[in-house]
């Protein structure tokens, strides 16, 4: 099964993708995490991506598409994947179609998380992440057991530089302009399901699992 999780920044894509991947035995492929990992390792890809991420802009398609293509060829993604943060515009959606067709694979479902703008801003400005294992927390809605420390691996938590109010506002505008048109694109293909992303994390997971039939 190959699934895309679509939705604005802060909708809960990362939080839910981890759970869906575990439930269905799929690889979690998160382009933002891959860029941040490259950035920490100081690779040329990471340094290139940073210039865009810091401003809340999309990293160029050529760089992003090549990175995703390499990732879905990894052994753990052969049984299927949950794509989180990709595609983010029409050119990327078309590139995804081409790369899947070339591998005799297809996209089974696109799940679009629907969350109101006020909640998105509260979620993003209170988000803390583990720089080591990528686990995501929220200071109020999903706090770690020990403040500032990752439950899973004990690493100190950090806030993302791009979760400042100013960059969040820019990212939401970029979403509306470039990514939101994908909802209509996948609806037309009849593989889109919109899912209410408001409410408790567990309730949202149950809705998504229900749509995927498991
Ligand atoms: P995305 O990957 O779509 O940007 P995240 O999964 O990182 O979203 O979630 C953004 C923030 O909101 C995180 O701090 C996360 O802990 C929190 N969060 C996720 N789902 C919910 C929810 N259902 N209710 C409240 N907060 C949530
Ligand atoms: P969020 O979880 O808040 O939606 P991500 O972690 O997915 O954010 O992405 C963070 C940043 O990484 C984006 O603002 C963008 O600069 C870059 N990025 C991630 N995915 C893509 C993509 N598919 N295309 C271009 N840039 C991307
Ligand atoms: Zn951790």
Image (tube, rainbow, N blue to C red):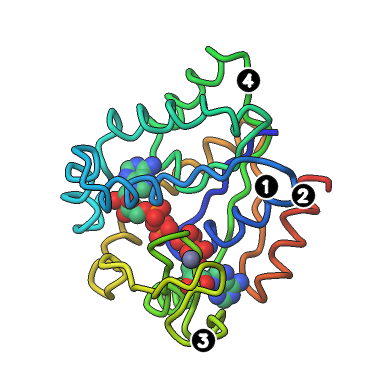
Q: Which mark is residue 154?
A: none
Q: Mark 2 and 1 residues: CB-CB less than 8 Å, in contact?
A: yes
Q: Give neighbour class at mark 3: few <14, some 14-19, many 20+ (Cα, 10 Å).
A: few
Q: Position of residue 16 (x, y in %)?
A: 61, 59
What residue is shown with label 1? 193
Disc 4 secondary structure class:
loop
- The image shows residue 154 at horizontal and vertical percentages of 48, 73
Which of the two marks, 3 or 1, is nearer to us in this view? Answer: 3
Are dots 4 and 3 in contact, CB under 8 Å? Answer: no
Image quadrant in which you'd find residue 155: bottom left
Which comes before the other along the chain, label 4 or label 2?
A: 4
**Which mark, by number, is residue 211?**
2
Dot 2: few (<14), some (14–19), or many (≥20) neighbours within 10 Å? Answer: some
Q: Earlier in the sequence, mark 4 or mark 3?
A: 4
- Of badges 3 and 2, nearer the viewer stands 3
The residue carrying pointer 4 sits among few (fewer than 14), some (14 to 19) or many (20 or more) residues within 10 Å by Cα, namely: some
Q: Nearer the viewer, residue 168 or 18?
A: 18
Q: Earlier in the sequence, mark 1 or mark 4?
A: 4
**Which of the two marks, 1 or 4, is nearer to us in this view?**
4
The mark that comes first in sequence, 3 or 2, is 3
Quickly name the residue at label 4. Answer: 105
For the residue pair 32 and 195, the one nearer the viewer reads as 32
User: Which is in the foreground here, disc 2 or disc 1?
Assistant: 2
In the rendered view, would you say 154 is above or below 2? below
Q: Which residue bears the numbered disc 3?
A: 146
Q: Measure the alpha-carbon separation of dots 4 and 3.
A: 43 Å
């Amino acid at each position: 099964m190959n699934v895309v999780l679509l939705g604005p920044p802060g909708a809960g894509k990362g939080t839910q993708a981890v759970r869906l991947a575990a439930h269905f035995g799929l690889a979690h492929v998160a382009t933002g995490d891959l860029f941040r990992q490259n950035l920490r390792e100081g690779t040329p890809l990471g340094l290139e991506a940073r210039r865009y991420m810091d401003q809340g802009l999309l990293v160029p398609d050529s760089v992003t598409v090549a990175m995703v293509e390499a990732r879905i060829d990894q052994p753990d993604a052969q049984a299927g994947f949950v794509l989180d943060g990709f595609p983010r515009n029409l050119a990327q959606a078309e590139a995804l179609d081409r790369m899947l067709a070339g591998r005799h694979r297809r996209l089974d479902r696109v799940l679009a998380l629907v969350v109101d703008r006020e909640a998105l801003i509260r979620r993003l400005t209170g988000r803390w992440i583990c720089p080591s294992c990528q686990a995501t927390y929220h200071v109020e809605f999903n706090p770690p057991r020990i403040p500032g420390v990752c439950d899973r691996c004990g690493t100190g938590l950090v806030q993302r530089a791009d979760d400042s109010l100013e960059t969040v506002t820019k990212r939401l505008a970029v979403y509306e302009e470039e990514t939101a048109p994908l909802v209509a694109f996948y609806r037309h293909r009849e593989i889109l399901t919109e899912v209410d992303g408001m409410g408790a994390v567990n309730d949202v997971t149950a809705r998504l699992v229900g749509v995927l039939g498991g």
